[in-house]
Amino acid sequence: MQNFETLLRGSAKAHGHLCPGQVVGVRMAMLGCDLIGLDEPKNLPQIKKIIVYVEMDRCATDAISFVTGVKLGRRSLKFVDNGIMAATFVNLDTQKAFRIVSTEESRDLAAVYAPEIIDKSQQQLEGYKRMSIEDLFTIEEVFVDVPACDMPGPTRFKAVCARCHTVVRDKREVLKNNEILCRPCAVGTYYQPVRKKGRKDVSKNSPAVF
Amino acid sequence: MCQKTAPPSFKTIPVEKAVGTTLAHDMTEIIPGKSKGPVFKKGYKVKSEDVCRLMRMGKNNLYVLDLKESQVHEDDAVYELASSLSGPGVQFSGNPKEGKLELRATYPGLFKVNIDALIDFNMIEDVMCASIHNNRVVMKNQALAATRAIPLVIEKKELEKAVKTARDHYPIVSVKLFSPLKIRLIITGNEVYKGLVQDRFQAIVEKKATALGAVVKESIILPDDRETITRQVKSYLKKDTDLIITTGGMSVDPDDVTRASIEKAGFDEVHYSSAVLPGAMFLLGYNKTTSIMGLPACGLYHKITIFDLILPRLMAGERPGKRDLAKLCHGGLCQNCTPCRFPACPFGKS
């Protein structure tokens, strides 16, 4: 694995800016990988051994993804919407897993570690770099039983929604009123349709694309 | 189930020749004062970089699997078994252990198992699956069933037979999602209406219904008067109501008029009585969009009654009929245990 400063530069570039969250995320990811015994998680064969559950969708998540190489599309990055600055690093080979939480105290401790810096954000950025692991994080060894339908690899499970006929992958279908349904049909959508036209109607008016 | 077992397909080979072979059992490494645990799991394919570590662990020879073309390792086999058994709302671990996998609920709901198909599955050699009882309310991640390939290696043809049986009867195990039913409640009884006795039914119904995600939209206390009760049922039917629940008045006394009142309100289907104690004088009816349940007064005394068996099924979109109420007979007698262990007891597990 590259050193901290190199990873931080790369992470900031990938994320779009350098911020305290990048520092926390890079340090969390480096520690997580170390704890589960992976030193080159972005490369084969280790890229197939790691899954990370992140519990927030903020800057640190991008840093974790950059350092570890985990991605949503590879199914190696799992988002658990807890709103907690925490991530769990899982080694699929050994089953070793550690949950690391960024401490709330570290926000105040940044002033102790970087007293010469006045600007709050810069103080946190530098403070988090200098902070001891013990002050920055709480660490807990855990067991994560990753379900088969959440595993990376080819799609193994498919169902067809009885109502809209959409294919549902990875066992996300539900059984409601004796029908196998996709979740939008069963429990509603996060969006409101703007037009009530079907797909065919829309494509009729759209330019042909080859 | 296992009737005969194929001889284990092991062979012993020197560790330096083990690259590419599959370990027949877990390999434990002990680092004094630091750790002890399996570093290579059964089924692991040995790589060239592992040989030195195995030697450091004191392994000069290894038991490795020598699978024939017609055989499948138990962990691979059980993955296929679990995949074929699991319907909607059921998931299982991606890491089979010792040829076994637990099937767990993906979301809360009503557990369903095709019992006949499960028996057929268990008639096949070298495989098994055991489940909890049908029609049980389950929580997210609750264990529903467990399946395993019984020997260390299983004949491919037996595995294929088991998978085909499960797929032909798909889904053998599943979980039905509860709908948030809109409930309207009619509490009957002159004594309650006149204020001689305080109603306790509303709290009981609300507690049990909301626990499953239903909503009690409205409730009313009425005297034991046929016309009044019928009129109220009809009024609730005109509203957006999934389920009407009446309480009391279901027995055979002259004042017990709720049953007749419901029948007069005009339902397509009405079933009176169930093979359950407590809950024999129970009424269940339907029209096109609304169900009705008439709860007998036993619900005030007994913690668990027929109500606890039928409500989850309505919540799951089922419409139990006369035969379903009769089928509850086997296991339909509550033993009034102290403390009550329902649902972890035989009550209602027909």
Image: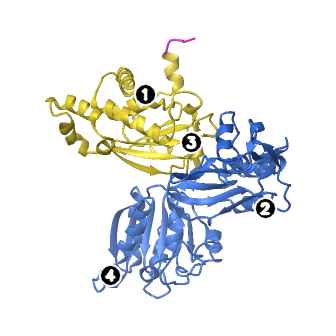
Mark 4 → mark 2, Cα distance in angstroms: 58 Å
| Residue B121 among those drawn in magenta | no
Circle on res. B1: 2
Q: Main secondary structure of the magenta part?
A: loop
How many numbered marks does the figure carry? 4
Which residue bears the numbered disc 3? A92
Q: Is residue B46 left or right of residue A186?
A: right
| Spot occupied by residue B213 in the image (x, y as percentages of width and height) | 42, 59
Mark 1 falls on what kind of element?
A: helix
The image quadrant that residue A18 belongs to is: top left
Side (left or right) of B279 relative to B149: left
In the image, residue B348 sits, relative to residue A197, either above or below, namely below
Chain ID for blue: B
Residue holding disc 4: B192
Disc 3 or disc 4, which is closer to the eye? 3
Q: Residue at x 57, y 76 (%)?
A: B347
Q: Which structural element holds mark 4?
A: helix
Q: CA distance from mark 1 to mark 2?
A: 49 Å
Q: Chain of mark 3?
A: A
Distance from disc 3 to disc 1, alpha carbons, whole Å, reads 19 Å
Which chain contains the residue that carries disc 1? A
Identity of the amino acid at label 4?
Val
Residue under pointer 1: A66
